[in-house]
Structures are given as C-alpha cells and as structure tokens.
Image: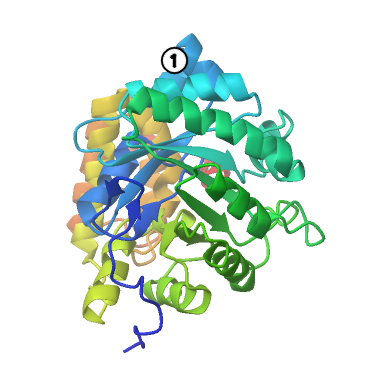
Amino acid sequence: MPDLKNNAFIARPLSIGPVRLATNLLLAPVAGYCDLAFRIVCREQGGVGLACTDLLSPHGLLRGTARSLDLAMTSDEDRPLCMQIYGNDADILADGARWAVDHGADVVDINMGCPVDKVVKKNGGSMLLCDPCRTVAMTERVVSAVQSASGGRVPVTAKMRLGWNDGELVAPALAVALARIGIALVTVHGRTTAQRFTGNASLDGIRAVVETVAASGCPIPVIGNGDVTEPTHAIRMMQYTGCGGVMIGRGSFSRSWLFRQIWSLQTRGVADPEPADSDKIAIIRRYLDLMVRFRGEHYAMNHVRRRISWLAKTLPPCKPFKEAIRIAPDPPAAHAILDDYLAGGLRSRGFIAAGESERASHSAATIELESAAA
C-alpha cells in the first residue's frame, strides 16, 4: 500500500475558484478523442472531477461552423464541463470565452501547450510560451471578459507545457504571472514543445512550477499531466511534485475506469479492481450507442473503427475482433460482433463471426492496411 501522507491534496476534492469538484482528477482536452460520448463514458465509470472538450477554435465558435459546434456539444450528463479555447488574438479569444460561458461552460481553459503544427503555425497552443508578456496580457483580457459574462461564476484556467525547449523553461514564472492576473488554476504537462509526445514527462519540471507558485503569494492549484497510465502513477506524481491533482489524457483512452481506480487508491489506499472483460465490452457498446445518439451512425462507425485498438487494448489478444469491428458496416453489425465476442468468438485468428461471412472476401492486405491506419 503506498504512503499517502506526504501531500495534503491527496484524497481532497479540488476547487477551481468557485467551482467545487467531486475529485481532484481531470480528463484532458485531447484533440480528436475527448468528444461528448467519450466524456460521458469516463464520467459514468466514476472518479472524474472535471472533463474538458476538444480544442475549440473561437473563430469557429463565433462563425457557428459545424465542426466547432460539434466539438463544443454538451449535455446534462456532461457536468461540470471545461471548454478549452486556443488562439493568439486577445479580442477573438475573449469573444470565444464569452460564447463558452453562454453555452454551458463551468470552466474556460486557454490552451498554451498544444505542440501540433496546425495549432502552433497559427501562433496558438505552445507558441504562447514564446512570448510570456504578450500571453499574460492576452489572458488578462480573457479573464476580464469571462468575469463580466459570468458574474464571477466561471473561472479561467490555463494548460501549458514546461517551455518550448529545455533552454526555455518558462512555465514556473508564467504560472505565477497568470495567477496574479486572475487565472484560477494551471495544468502543466511535463514535457517541452520540442519533445512533443516523446521521452518521459518530467516530474521535476512539474514540481518546479508547484513550488514557484506556492512561494509566490498567489497559491492557485497546479495540476500535473503526463504519462499517467496506472493508478500508482498518479499517486507518485502527486507525492513527488506536490501538485493538487492529476489530468489524464492518453492513459484514459483504453482505461476509461482509470479515474475511479485512482480516486479509490487515494481515498481507500487500494485501487478498484480491473473491470471484467464483459464490462469492458459493455463500455465499448455504450460508447458506440452514445456516438450514434449524438453524431449519427456514419460518424459513430468511423470513430469506433478508428478507436477500437484503444478501446480493446486491455482485452485478451483479439485481433479478429478488432478487425471485424473495423469492417463492420453499421451499428447493428458492430453490436452483433460484440455479442459474438461475449459468446467466446473472435479470439483467435481466422474466426469469422456469424453473419460476417460476406465480408471475409476482404484480402489480408486490406485488413492489414486498415489495422495499421487505426
């Protein structure tokens, strides 16, 4: 059993300004993954204190583009909710933040950490780390807009990386400057932009931000992020860095129940057990049904096909099952494949589910291509 005594934030629900959460665990805003259906699935498994939307373009929100509105979609089951906006224009970001307040955001987050080219090339995401003074001034404009639009009900937060590269670790000083102008919480991914998603997240880097903020006289919560894929990883991060909570992204893609396990480990000293295979299949089924409900059959099938490797990652070896899902033409066929798996099929190469024989004509090369693309 891990020692849980050396961080006062362990097992303590997090507060972000006036917003009190049920736990200190957050679902990260990962582009292309954190859609409404996935957020609800994670919430239903337990332990999620706050879930965040995909990255939202304020330009798209304000123009009402279909893609931006789809990414910002929410529901009554999706609370409390953080909407994350990105960009570098203070006026546009402020207007986008007001839109978020008006459309159900309990928290508004500014992306200062995305390393992806299509964001960085527009001077958004982690490019904001390269000009901290301008970033602070821009953020102050957003904080003021949200304060006015929400009457102080909605806090503004920021998610950042440690810096552009190892020679420019601006996160400690930037976090303090942001706290002084009203940012209610910062999340720190323990990598630089140059690292992208390679190497290991630096607990020392996160700890430096925690300690600098604590000594600043503006002690807002600092949340750690990066490489948390097991319950003990979250405890280690909190113990070593002193952070007030943990944000989880990729670690949740194949383990939507990870939040519940971490909260159980914090509060009871023992992580909840791994779900049974039948429960994992039920989670895949629930995700498919929610995707159909919110986005329609065509969109739902595209995303389930793309994500099945993640969704089935913790199941026993089942390549035929994943291949069958990738070529399933519609939700009823996908549900039939899930039923076949529960009945004991699709667990060895060459097995073809009942009713799927007409698709057996797909060549092995096609199957391998689809597998590699997922």
Q: Residue at x 29, y 74 (%)?
A: 266
| x and y percentages locating residue 289 in the rendered image | 23, 35
Q: Residue at x 36, y 70 (%)?
A: 9
Q: Is residue 232 visible?
A: yes
How many discs appear? Answer: 1
- Residue lying furthest right: 167
90, 190: nearer the viewer: 90
- Location of residue 151 with respect to 202 vertically, above or below: above
On the rendered structure, is 340 left or right of 316?
left
What secondary structure is found at the residue carrying circle 1? helix
| x and y percentages locating residue 222 in the rendered image | 49, 59
Say which amino acid is labelled 1.
Ala
- Location of residue 82 with respect to 102 vertically, above or below: below
337, 288: nearer the viewer: 288
- Location of residue 18 with respect to 153 vertically, above or below: below
Q: Residue at x 55, y 42 (%)?
A: 181
| x and y percentages locating residue 334 in the rendered image | 28, 39
- Residue lying furthest front: 217
Q: Quadrant of residue 272?
A: bottom left
- Badge 1 is on which residue? 66
- Residue lying furthest top: 63
| x and y percentages locating residue 192 in the rendered image | 70, 56
